[in-house]
Amino acid sequence: MTAEMHLNGTSQQFNAMRSAWTLEEARAIYDSPFNDLLFRAQTVHRQNFEPNRVQLSRLLSIKTGGCPEDCGYCSQSSRHESGLKASKLMEVQRVLAEAKKAKDAGATRYCMGAAWRSPKERDMDAVVAMIEGVKDMGMETCMTLGMLDLGQAQRLKEAGLDYYNHNIDTSERYYNEIITTRTFADRLDTLANVRDSGIKVCCGGIVGMGEEKADRVDMLVTLANLPEHPDSVPINMLIPIEGTPLGEAEPIEPIEFVRTIALARIMMPKSHVRLSAGRTAMSDEMQALCFFAGANSIFVGDTLLTAENPGEDKDTALFRRLGIQPMERGE
Ligand code: SF4
């Protein structure tokens, strides 16, 4: 297959690693005829990944609820009446026991999330022990703990942390509609600290929060124009949660969601694009389209932090029907 195609009359290179995307270019790709968009995304995907493999991650909430931040989508904010009960940081041995189960069930990456604004000094020893323990089992490690300064990021790196998740959530323009307790620039600072410490970045956002199409495109342009493309780009579809400010949000139109995945794949050709929260509300056909558009990573397990996720049986059945195999570690 040729590495070039004509889109909107312009010959465009499929596979170049770029980090100077303009909003106009990105919008034109997002708005191109659906078949052209999917063909282009699938072509980029095949040039960079084995097309029938999807990476499986397992996510554990190591500290749930009681978060001082006000993210409008989140059941874990202490400012919203979601009815979620807050818990303390889990004990290290319990985390490692859960990680062992995940490994036995085939997970190659173990993600641990804590509902914090940022980790406190008193929690760092336990967090480090969790990373070391999961690494010893032979799995990749990922954490999401809120904002990090450079010293904290370096400490996590020394413990062996492979990935740090910190999402930008949405476009810079729409950001203040969703979160007021930390700024878009704060998020970029944490991403810089993670990158500078040598940890791989996992960074994406959420769609279906009432944003406009232009916000979805802007968010992806911000990610694609970071000094390095994030290694993983989670794209979440909002799960509206009662008691949160976005509890009544209108669902995003499925084709718009698939367009978002395709644009992420095209602009960040070597990143793992993760179909994250929201899969329970997607049909099998919509998920299949997302895989075709370049999504190649999912979370497995019945829950995602506090939200529902399709069970393993359902995912195994879908993979069998689509001929998809789980990725090996490091793939
Ligand atoms: S998304 Fe994270 S930082 Fe925001 S309220 Fe929820 S747990 Fe806190």
Image (cartoon, grey):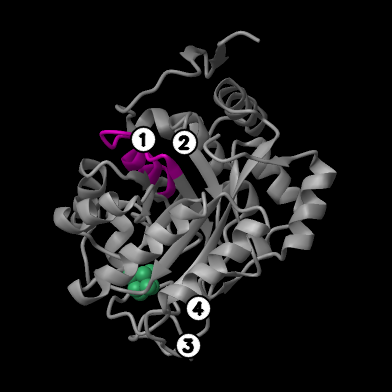
Q: Residue at x 36, y 74 (%)?
A: 115
Disc 3 packing (10 Å; few <14; some 14–19; many ≥20): some
Q: Which residue is mark 4?
A: 247
Q: Residue at x 48, y 88 (%)?
A: 84
Label located before the other in sequence (2 or 3): 3
With respect to residue 283, does 8 lie above or below? above
Q: Secondary structure at mark 1?
A: loop
Q: Secondary structure at mark 2?
A: loop
Q: Secondary structure at mark 4?
A: loop
Asked whether disc 2 touches disc 1, contact meaning CB atoms under 8 Å apart, the reply is yes
Residue 212: % across, % down: 43, 53
Disc 4 packing (10 Å; few <14; some 14–19; many ≥20): some
> Which span of residues is magenta-colored?
216-232
Asked whether disc 1 touches disc 4, contact meaning CB atoms under 8 Å apart, the reply is no
Q: Which residue is mark 1?
A: 229
As shown in the figure, which amino acid type bears the numbered disc 1? Answer: His
- Give the number of the mark in front: 4 or 2: 2
- Give the number of the mark in front: 3 or 4: 3
Q: Which residue is mark 3?
A: 84
The quarter of the picture where the C terminus appears is top right
Beta carbon of the mark 1 residue lies under 8 A of ligand 1: no
